[in-house]
Image (spheres, rainbow, N blue to C red):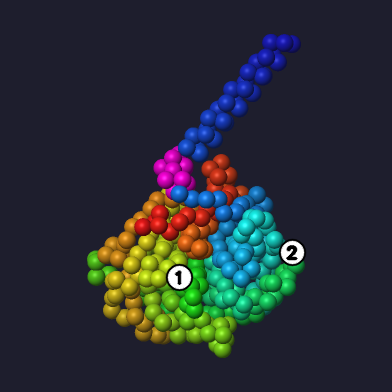
């Protein structure tokens, strides 16, 4: 009896060793090529819900209450949530389950979210071509686990040919940026969004810059001020003065944060959603720098000079990030990306 037991134990030890070596190899593969990024970054907070079916997408910061807001979708198809996370402690404060403006469970991608301080929370939905609009006072009053109905929606569609599929958003000062994601074959954009830039690049996505106005419906002036022409695979955007940061990723390939001079490459005006707008290209001529970072980056937000990057790699859907410390939302000084 002793020999079979020894064989079983030996097999178990070998299996454990193989698994350990495999996990170490995975960690090294995904971390060593971006070691400079991890060295320059700090762990901001643990991304909530990564072990309960949540796939993180959007991030925003409420400076008044000093907490982060995180959104995304559920692998199970349940209500997409908004998590509130305390900045100082990293503690999960509460979870709010979203409904659409009809009072039905909202189970969409929730690709991004942005805050009009003290007024509204906007959640991007590319399938419905809109931002769902939530009264922020209701967010503040809600208890952990409450469901919240959208107060309305802000449409980004005039027709099937003239629309924008919101994939990410950002609020900077009194401006709201709403952008779309392009990837050939499965994430197409309207043909009118294709721009051959002065540098010779071909961009196929747009971001529109709106003015926030608390006298307007949903707090947004419906006429955009101007537009950005974007490259493909953009998951998030943030503006810091004239510098525009883009988070780009798709699948398990390494992500990138690119910094552009947002006003350097002005193009011919573009007509979108029925408005003719000034257009600025984020292309090779306006690129300041580009840094490779960990895979599956999503939305970004800047807080006190640090760029925080949301990531979906540690979710139950993709798993591998659980072994590469991707459960953390990292903050990195903006100087690293220039």
x and y, in percent, of residue 96 in the image? 69, 66
Instruction: Read off the residue under disc 1.
Output: 179
Residue that sits furthest to the bottom in the current view: 215
Q: Nearer the viewer, mark 2 or mark 1?
A: 2
The one nearer the camera, 128 or 49, is 49
Predominant SS of the magenta segment: helix
Q: What's the distance in space between the residues labelled 2 and 1, CA to CA?
A: 30 Å
| Quadrant including the C terminus | bottom left
Compared to residue 119, the image places residue 337 above or below, namely above
x and y, in percent, of residue 75 in the image? 62, 56
Where are the magenta residues, as a range? 29-39
Residue 276 in the magenta stretch? The answer is no
The one nearer the camera, 28 or 200, is 28
Q: Which mark is residue 324?
A: none
| Quadrant including the N terminus | top right
The residue that appears at 50% across and 70% down in the rendered structure is 169
The one nearer the camera, 129 or 231, is 231
x and y, in percent, of residue 279 in the image? 34, 77
The residue that appears at 41% across and 63% down in the rendered structure is 245
Location of residue 234 (image quadrant): bottom left
The one nearer the camera, 133 or 120, is 120
Pointer 1 local density, CA inside 10 Å: few below 14, some 14–19, many at least 20: many
x and y, in percent, of residue 298 in the image? 50, 59
Disc 2 is placed on an element classified as loop
Instruction: Read off the residue under disc 2.
Output: 144
The residue that appears at 41% across and 42% down in the rendered structure is 33
Residue 36 in the magenta stretch? The answer is yes
């Amino acid at each position: 009896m002793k020999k079979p037991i020894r064989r079983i134990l030996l097999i178990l030890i070998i299996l454990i060793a193989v698994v350990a070596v495999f996990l170490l190899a995975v960690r090294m593969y995904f971390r060593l090529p971006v070691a400079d990024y991890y060295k320059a970054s700090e762990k901001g907070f643990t991304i909530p819900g990564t072990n309960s079916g949540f796939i993180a997408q959007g991030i925003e910061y409420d400076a008044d209450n000093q907490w982060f807001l995180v959104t995304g979708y559920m692998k199970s198809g349940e209500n997409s949530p908004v998590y509130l996370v305390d900045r100082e402690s990293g503690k999960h404060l509460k979870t709010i389950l979203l409904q659409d403006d009809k009072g039905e469970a909202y189970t969409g991608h929730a690709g991004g979210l942005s805050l009009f301080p003290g007024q509204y929370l906007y959640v991007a939905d590319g399938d419905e071509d809109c931002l769902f609009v939530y009264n922020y006072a209701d967010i503040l009053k809600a208890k952990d686990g409450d469901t919240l109905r959208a107060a309305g929606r802000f449409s980004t569609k005039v027709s099937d040919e003239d629309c924008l599929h919101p994939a990410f958003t950002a609020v900077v000062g009194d401006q709201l940026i709403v952008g779309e994601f392009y990837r050939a074959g499965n994430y197409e954009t309207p043909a009118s969004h294709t721009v051959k830039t002065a540098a010779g690049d071909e961009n196929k996505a747009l971001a529109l810059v709106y003015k926030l106005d608390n006298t307007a419906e949903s707090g947004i002036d419906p006429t955009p001020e101007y537009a950005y022409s974007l490259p493909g695979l953009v998951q998030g955007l943030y503006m810091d003065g004239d510098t525009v940061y883009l988070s780009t990723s798709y699948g398990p390939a390494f992500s990138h944060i690119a910094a552009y001079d947002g006003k350097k490459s002005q193009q011919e005006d573009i007509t979108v959603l029925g408005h003719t707008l000034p257009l600025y290209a984020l292309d090779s001529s306006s690129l300041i720098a580009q840094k490779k970072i960990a895979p599956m980056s999503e939305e970004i937000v800047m807080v006190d000079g640090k760029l925080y990057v949301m990531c979906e790699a540690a979710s139950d859907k993709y798993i591998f990030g659980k072994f590469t410390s991707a459960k953390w939302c990292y903050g990195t000084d903006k100087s690293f990306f220039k």
